[in-house]
Amino acid sequence: MDVNDRQAHRAVELLRRHVELDGARVAVLGLAFKPQTDDVRNSRALDVIRLLDERGADVVAYDPEATENARRALDIDVEYADSAQDAVEDAAGIVIATDWDEFEGIDASGAVVVDGRRVEVRNAEVYEGLCW
């Protein structure tokens, strides 16, 4: 397993330290491999979503550009939100995988946040930084 593959596992493990994933609503923000694109090839977010699904989480995902490509790439049941704030509403956990500008200052509403991109969030119950 290479370093990038391990990062997806690390993100899920950090979240699992604080949240019982089975049945938990978990938001994944950013599906493209980088901002300003709809390209999901080699996206760590898709790996994170698959791992969360394997652990029984109810995943809700959002990306301003890459949702349709992610939908085609994933062969699992994922809810897709219309906005970042809709995605994080009532979420026990949030994984930030791509640093879209609109994610800055998002209200995490007491959720556990695993941030892979150093995005400033508000009201996180727990904040775990992870840069990939």
Image: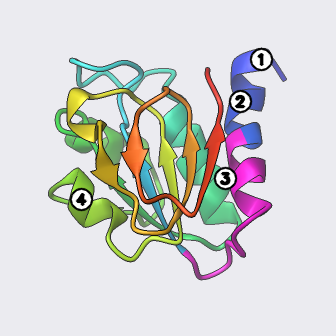
Q: What is the quadrant of the N terminus in the image? A: top right
> Residue 12: within the magenta?
yes
Residue at the disc numbered 4: 85
For marks 2 and 3, the one nearer the N-term is 2
**Alpha carbon separation for disc pair 3 and 4:** 23 Å
**Residue 80 appears in view:** no
Which sits in the foreground, 15 or 127?
127
Residue at the disc numbered 3: 51
Magenta span = 11-24
Query: Above or below — where is 24 with respect to 118?
Result: below
> Is label 2 in contact with label 1 (beta carbons under 8 Å)?
yes
Residue at the disc numbered 2: 7
Residue 78 position, x and y percent, is 40, 63
For marks 1 and 3, the one nearer the N-term is 1
Residue at the disc numbered 1: 3
Residue 57 position, x and y percent, is 59, 71
For marks 2 and 4, the one nearer the N-term is 2
What element does badge 3 sit on?
Answer: helix
> Is label 4 in contact with label 1 (beta carbons under 8 Å)?
no
Q: Residue at x 78, y 51 (%)?
A: 13
Q: What is the quadrant of the C terminus in the image? A: top right
Amino acid type, callout 3: Leu
Which sits in the foreground, 121 or 35?
121
Tag of residue 22: none
Amino acid type, callout 2: Gln
**Alpha carbon separation for disc pair 2 and 4:** 25 Å
Q: Nearer the viewer, mark 4 or mark 1?
A: 4
Q: Nearer the viewer, mark 2 or mark 3?
A: 2
Amino acid type, callout 1: Val
Graded by Cα atoms within 10 Å as few (under 14), some (14 to 19) or many (20 or more), the crowding at tag 3 reads some
What element does badge 2 sit on?
Answer: helix
